[in-house]
Image: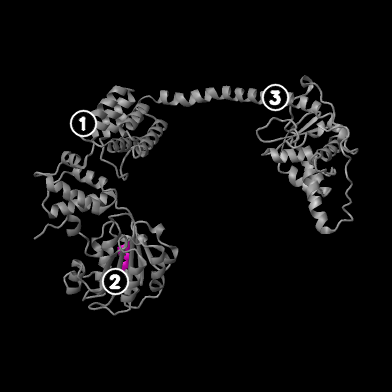
Amino acid sequence: MAYIALYRKWRPGTFGDLVGQEHISKTLSNAITTGRIGHAYLFSGPRGTGKTSTAKILAKALNCEHGPTPEPCGTCRQCQKINDGSSMDVFEIDAASNRGIDEIRDLRETVKFAPVDGRYKVYIIDEVHMLTTEAFNALLKTLEEPPAHVVFILATTEAHKVPPTIQSRCQRYDFKRITVEEIRGRLAKIAQEMSLSIEDEALNMIAVQADGGLRDALSLLDQCSAVAEGEITAARVRQILGLIGHDWIYRMTEAIAAHKSQTVLTVLAELLRDGKDLKQVLTELSLHLRSLMIYQATGTLEQMDLYAENDQVLQEQKTFFNAGQLMAMLKKLHEALAEIKWSPQPRITVEMALLTLCNPEAAAAAPQLQAAAAPDDQRIAQLEAKLAQMSAKLAAAPVQKAAAPRTKAAPATSKPAPVSAPVQEIPDLDTSDTAVWQNLLQTLKDRNKMPVYACVNQGQFAGMTETKFFIRFTGTLMASLTMRNYQTLLEEILQELTGRELRLHCSGEDAPMAPPPRPVKKAKPPVQELEPDEPPPVPVDLENLPPEARAPLEKAFEIFGDHVVEVEEDGPVEK
């Protein structure tokens, strides 16, 4: 007869055999006894906690020849068929490999048929969260109103991936992780039934490594019993499972506490020569540090699901570090565990982590050096800002002088630009007083100057002095349009708001705070270079123009100004 793995041989056959899930077994037993059998169940929980086993027990309880009963006999024809997977009324579907809409459509077609031998047709869908969205939608209506002879049992390790519409149509049962004590007791009972000799420490190691899953624990016990010669010892279990062992971890902890970097690296090298895994080294070291942290806080490790560590060693090593140091060390080890998954040289990552634990002062010096450099960086930034400010002042003075001839050709309504003071007499920019800026925007809105407001509102207040007002735009285009079309109006409003003449300065994001020069086209000279006999402006009467001709002219005046001249065939280009 072929060998049967322990996790299959010792699979629970009744609700009483379930380990650590009494809250579920009792509820389902009462439901069967009272006849309140649901049409759909959702079993969720970690792997190896009994979800599929419970589904099969429920199927047997519903179809047993002596039932429905919460205690199926396991010997009748129906129970035996369900146990060996040959029942025509119990269907086990792996949603990981049958996740499409076609498989669910086939299921919907078979649901309508009556059971072959038993009372109920039971559909067990394992890893149901793997179904596609279309498959869930196809299952939805059948799951909501199935025939009276159908029971659905959905099992998953990731219940959050199951759509709420599916969950709301099921009775949900959450399977909890099985404790180390419960796993150890079950393993001891199985070992006794199989006449296996195993040490208590070995049982405890297997129970801890199972990580809350009884199926994993039975697989580990099966592996250890296959290679054990006589008694299964803790040393043999440690060798088979690749565990590091308490002695090595104790040595490493003592070396870290004594700041002996060479000893720590030597221990690591010896473990690697013995074939130990880097991840396992960090994991067991973090578990031991956790034991020290909990032992410091509570004085015991009972009910903590940890290795049975030596109380004498814990009593001695708990004085090596304080609580804050232990938390910082655990955080560093967890960071290293995450880094070695992607590191091209995992050993270097582990060595860096261990050296950091040995020399916490050196590791803490780097942030302090960065903090010490921060004032220097701030001082340099201030100097750079002052330099940029002086550059803006120097650039502003000659531009204002060059702009003087332009005032001669300006309309009579334009006021002359104020003469700027020498650079050394201009005070620093005041960027804190934003009230003038806000009042300027509000005034434009109150006076219904919406085109001007829309343009100026795209800029930001960049500061002001006794004689200048600065606006910064994200680009040079809007800055140029503002200076060319709206400078006079804005300066008049600023004079009304502040009581003094302020010269408007607009710039792009990266340009210095100086008025940008007027764009010069190659086809014509700049305005300030026009000859004295420049053609006079042509008056335009917008009121007498038809609406279809007036609208484009008004738009052009907003963008380019209202100085219109007559264009000759070979004359100057229109402004």
Which residue corresponds to the image point at 53% horizontal and 22% vertical from the top-left? 372
**Residue of label 3:** 391
Question: Which circle's residue, 1 or 3, is located before the other in the chain?
Answer: 1
Which dot, 2 or 3, sits closer to the camera? 3
The span picked out in magenta is 24-29
Residue 26 image position (x, y, % from top left): 31, 65
Q: Nearer the viewer, residue 235 or 25?
A: 235
In 3D space, how far apart are the residues under numbered discs 1 and 2 (Cα atoms)?
Answer: 53 Å
* Left or right: residue 557 compared with residue 163: right
Q: Quadrant of residue 331?
A: top left
| Residue occupying the point 34% across, 56% down | 157
Quadrant location of residue 108?
bottom left
Q: Badge 2 is on which residue?
A: 122
Examine the rendering and report whether any part of residue 37 can be seen: no
Secondary element at tag 1: helix
Q: How much space separates mark 2 and mark 3, taking CA atoms?
A: 84 Å
Is 192 included in the stretch rendered in magenta?
no
Give the residue pinned by disc 1.
273
Earlier along the polypeptide chain: callout 1 or callout 2? 2
Q: Is residue 52 left or right of residue 516?
A: left
The quadrant of the rendering that contains the N terminus is bottom left
Quarter occupied by residue 467? top right
**Three-letter code, disc 1:** Arg
Amino acid at dot 3: Ser
Residues under labels 1 and 3: Cα distance?
Answer: 66 Å
Label 2, residues with CA under 10 Å away: few <14, some 14-19, many ≥20: many
Quick one: 269 or 399, which is closer to the camera?
A: 399
* Whole-percent x, y for residue 560 in the image: 78, 43
Q: In the rendered structure, which disc, 2 or 3, sits on the residue that comes first in sequence?
A: 2
Circle 2 sits in a helix, a strand or a loop, which is it?
strand
Residue furthest top as drawn: 424
Q: Is residue 277 visible?
A: yes
